[in-house]
Image (cartoon, rainbow, N blue to C red):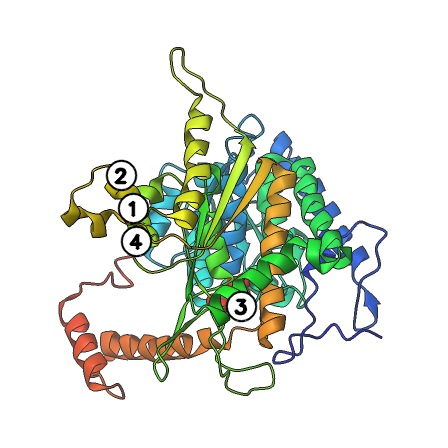
Amino acid sequence: MLNTQINSTENRSVLHVALRAPRDKVICSDGKNVVPEVWKVLDKIKEFSELVRSGSWVGATGKALKDVVAVGIGGSFLGPLFVHTALQTDLIFLLKPSYENLANVDPIDVARNIAGLDPETTLVVVVSKTFTTAETMLNARTLREWITAALGPKAVAKHMVAVSTNLTLVEKFGIDPNNAFAFWDWVGGRYSVCSAVGVLPLSLQYGFSVVEKFLKGASIIDQHFYSTPFEKNIPVLLGLLSVWNVSFLGYPARAILPYTQALEKFAPHIQQASMPLYFPSRLRVSMESNGKGVSIDGVRLPFEAGEIDFGEPGTNGQHSFYQLIHQGRVIPCDFIGVVKSQQPVYLKGEVVSNHDELMSNFFAQPDALAYGKTAEQLLSENVSQNLIPHKTFTGNRPSISLLLPSLNAYNVGQLLAIYEHRVAVEGFIWGINSFDQWGVELGKSLASQVRKQLNSSRTKGESVKGFNFSTTALLSRYLEVLEIPLPDKPLSLL
Ligand SMILES: O=P(O)(O)OC[C@H]1O[C@H](O)[C@H](O)[C@@H](O)[C@@H]1O
């Protein structure tokens, strides 16, 4: 039998393709076909989201719920946010409950998210694979407090639901297990947008039929990736280009530049699949999926792997960091354009439509990068000698251009799956484990040491100890001046 436990450092299968497989497909983990379980949860989401959208699911005081706050961070936040934002303008007529995303543990994020919301008409979706992530759980407790303070403890059953692999902790938290939507160990957090993590919030917003199209788009790419010869296989070609740029040409970064505002959250999502880490010993900058310093067998890599991803929608980026891309360091770019705009506008008397104006830039930028401008060309334009070095463009700067026919749920699913598989292709070639993320653990455990210190200093006046000189000084200073709300003076929420 095929060994699907390719995430060998966590003894986990990697099966996010099963999340979007057709009902009749057989995909096994530990000898068990997981597709029926996937569809059981999808059917449950369909039913629940229809109840909420139709107003049949009512809150503790009998009112329909009209706002959704999704609480989650990392993979339990960025993917759904990217898809939600991508479809927002296309499907504005379908958008039923409003959609807020609470990720940061900063109380400012809580306050901003619930500003103007009424607990009576709000549904909170707590999204956490582990149900132990410190930020998410504190935010969930804060919103539980917000709901119960207004509506009483029983209101949690009607106003809070959860998405998690850890249903025991969901129940312990006080959420009715009937209102929990499961997913599985074989879904990595950053690959979970096609599980209930993304499907529940998106179904609540746009309806289940839209989400089905999104899943179908991703599934089509899964089939393409599985069966298309390498020379025509989009994720394979893109992955090879990345490996070439990073490991052979030594370009450490990649700019993701969608020429559509609808994809404004795409680069942040891909960044999560590639969160930068810092290895002081080698000044290595790396990422969550492919940001590894060692091979899958634990041997230190003799080459650089992973890219530093960043990006902004065009044309905004053109007015900030493109200067460096054109004349400074070489940054391979992914240009993503769309043929048919979600929002066509053509003003009378204008030379082109607004979308054509945007796309003029999409076509121009890769050419400027590739071909540049020579001193000879500048001379022929009578540019003065002293400005020639400043106005010269070296060219020979790599980019790829993806042109999507439109940006609907189906195409968004395709785009997601292309990038997911591309990450895997790169990881396979580099010989690393693209599916673990041990690099995020150290910071978390040090934060828990700080948390203990803050508690003992605040409650018992204990002095700061056990930290290095710099952190001791900073912590002491922090404890000296910051006013905190005491238990008898509760944090007031907006
Ligand atoms: O979904 P959760 O268990 O709350 O995890 C949220 C996030 O936690 C960590 O930071 C991981 O590095 C991420 O990959 C994960 O998405």
Mark-to-mark CA distance, 2 and 3: 48 Å
Q: Which residue is mark 3?
A: 289
Picture coordinates of residue 119, whole percent (x, y): 45, 41
Type of residue at label 2? Ser
Measuring 65% from the left and 64% from the top, which residue is drawn there? 187
Measuring 65% from the left and 37% from the top, which residue is drawn there? 210
Measuring 26% from the left and 85% from the top, which residue is drawn there? 467
Quadrant into which the C terminus falls: top left
Task: For label 2, count other residues whose C-alpha is less than 10 Å away and answer few (under 14), some (14-19) or many (20+).
Answer: few
Mark whose residue sits in front, 3 or 4: 4
Q: Nearer the viewer, residue 319 or 26?
A: 319
Label 1 vs 3, first from the N-terminus: 3
Q: Which residue is mark 4?
A: 327
Q: Which residue is mark 2?
A: 380
Measuring 62% from the left and 65% from the top, which residue is drawn there? 425
Picture coordinates of residue 59, whole percent (x, y): 55, 39
Type of residue at label 4? Gln
Vertically, is 263 above or below 457? above
